[in-house]
Amino acid sequence: MDDTHTDLQLLVLMREDRQDAFEMLYMRYWLSLYDAAYQRLKSVEQAEDIVQEIFLRLWARRHDVQIDNLPVYLHMAVRYSVYNLVTRGIASRTFYRPLEAITSLATAADAKVIEKELYELILAYIETLPRKRRQIFTLYFEENL
């Protein structure tokens, strides 16, 4: 099979149990999904596991799932998988190192400066979010909703 098929065409072929269409999608997206998972977790093994699991679920649900935008669907799956690892407490230690470094510095003499810089970074991050996501973030972290 050549690489001229669109994602939607490949998804249709995959619903017809065409393994070659699945393999084409895998080759098209595995690296970007791996990069997205690795950037969040800094763990080769966990990033590989997440990508494998996402594609296994995609194949298993090929007859049931309706996907309009495959890259968005796959990257959201990576995000949720990472969040799952973090909430279950099994994310790699490297995921937590930046936060640990910041909190360990909080007892230092320049703690107020660091706290102010961290607060400014958080505000800058919030401003980059889409309007709805910014609202959710604010409700969750500022109002505990």
Image (cartoon, rainbow, N blue to C red):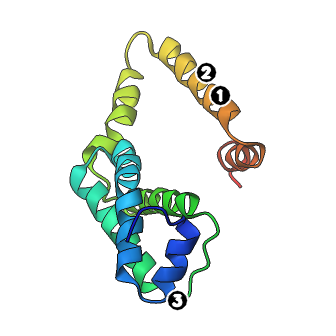
Which residue carries the number 1 mark? Answer: 123
Mark 1 or 3, nearer chain start: 3
Q: Are marks 3 and 2 in contact (CB under 8 Å)?
A: no
Which amino acid, mark 3?
His
Q: Which mark is residue 63?
A: 3
Question: How many neighbours does mark 3 have within 10 angstroms: few (below 14), some (14-19), or many (20 or more)?
Answer: some
Q: Is there any visible trace of residue 124 in the rendered image?
A: yes
Q: Residue at x 65, y 45 (%)?
A: 141
Which amino acid, mark 1?
Leu
Which residue carries the number 2 mark? Answer: 120
Q: Are marks 1 and 3 in contact (CB under 8 Å)?
A: no
Vertical placement of residue 79 versus 59, above or below: above
Residue 44 located left or right of residue 29: left
What kind of element bears circle 3? loop
- Residue with the most extreme left position: 45
Residue 60 is situated, as x and y percent measured from the top left of the image, at 41, 85
What kind of element bears circle 1? helix
Q: Residue at x 50, y 66 (%)?
A: 5
Residue 103: image quadrant is top left
Residue 81 is situated, as x and y percent measured from the top left of the image, at 43, 62
**Frontmost residue, 59 versus 1:** 1
